[in-house]
Image (cartoon, rainbow, N blue to C red):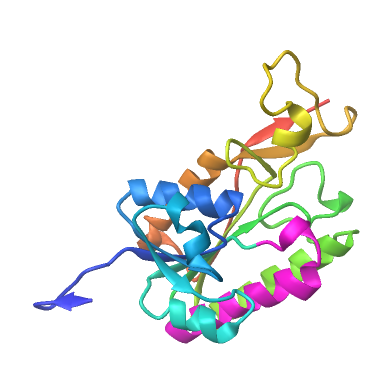
Amino acid sequence: MSTNGVIIMEKKILIIGITGGIGGTFASTCRKRGWQIKALHRDPSAVKSGFTDIEWAKGDAMNATDVSEAAKDVDVIFHGANPPGYRKWRELALPMLQNSIAAAVRHKIRLLFPGNVYNFGPGAMPLVTEASPQNPDTRKGHIRVEMEQLLKEAAQNGAKVLIVRAGDFFGPDAKGSWFPHAIVKPGKKINSVVYPGRHDAGHAWAYLPDLAETFAQLLERHDQLGTFEVFHFGGHYFSP
């Protein structure tokens, strides 16, 4: 937007997946930092009571036209959508990301994407950096590599991309996470904590409010970012 020759950044962000753990947490963080929040949802009337001061766009993340229309007046897209039950990645997760990418390219805006460690295989150890080779040995890992390749191509076609890779989510709004189901018993006094993994293997964890704050602080340094940026989130690491 331009006023009397001065360019003003409106600071408006479209969140895809606002009812998920990372999407909802990031929305709260952005609101506190003065961003205008817009969210895409199939049925806004069913969820808007839990989210205040948000502009709603009715639409489906699986519909490219819906995503593009919702993104036409924003500065940034945050793609935090995941398939129900964290399943059907190729059938659902990949097409949803492709639609957000198409919108970012069309409108020449930045796309934020929470990545993870799935796209690294055992050969990347012991120190996994942003530039470590991506040779996964799992199906989801291969899809994650494909996703990041699509994002890299988007950055070559007019969009700007920011990826922050992190470990498994935990925190008060970590929907679908192991935390509320396996580590502690919901609704009961905490007398013990159960670690939901192998005790002989290290594991990376990301506290959602900290991850959301990291995204926000990086985004506010947009003038220092390139067209394609990848960062690793330190988080917490369980070491046997």
Asked if 61 appears above or below 218 in the picture, the reply is below
Q: How many marks?
A: 0
In the orientation shown, which residue stands out farthest toward the top? 191
Between residue 218 and residue 44, name the one nearer to us.
Answer: 44
* Magenta-colored stretch includes residue 24: no
Residue 236, picture quadrant: top right
* Nearest to the observer: residue 77 or residue 158: 77
Q: Position of residue 141 (x, y in %)?
A: 82, 61
Q: Which residues are magenta?
A: 82-107
Front one among 230 and 114: 114
Q: Can residue 215 be seen by looking at this rendering?
A: no
The image shows residue 131, relative to residue 176, as above or below, that is below
Residue 213 seen by the camera: yes
Q: Is-magenta flag for residue 86?
A: yes
The residue under the point 56% across, 75% down is 100
Q: In the displayed image of the protein, which residue is found farthest to the left?
A: 4
Measured as percent of width and height from the top left, residue 164 is found at 59, 54
Give the x, y percent position of residue 138: 89, 59
The quadrant of the rendering that contains the C terminus is top right
Q: Position of residue 135 (x, y in %)?
A: 84, 61
Residue at the location (72% across, 39% down)? 204
Compared across the picture, whether 178 is left or right of 150 comes to right
Question: Which image quadrant: the N terminus?
Answer: bottom left
Task: Tell me: 213 left or right of 121.
Answer: left
Left or right for 2, reference 101: left
Going 89% across and 32% down the picture, which residue do you hit?
198
User: Main SS of the magenta segment?
Assistant: helix
The part of the image, by quadrant, that contains residue 120 is: bottom right
Q: Spot the residue most to the front.
A: 45
Residue 12 higher or lower than 72, as above or below: above
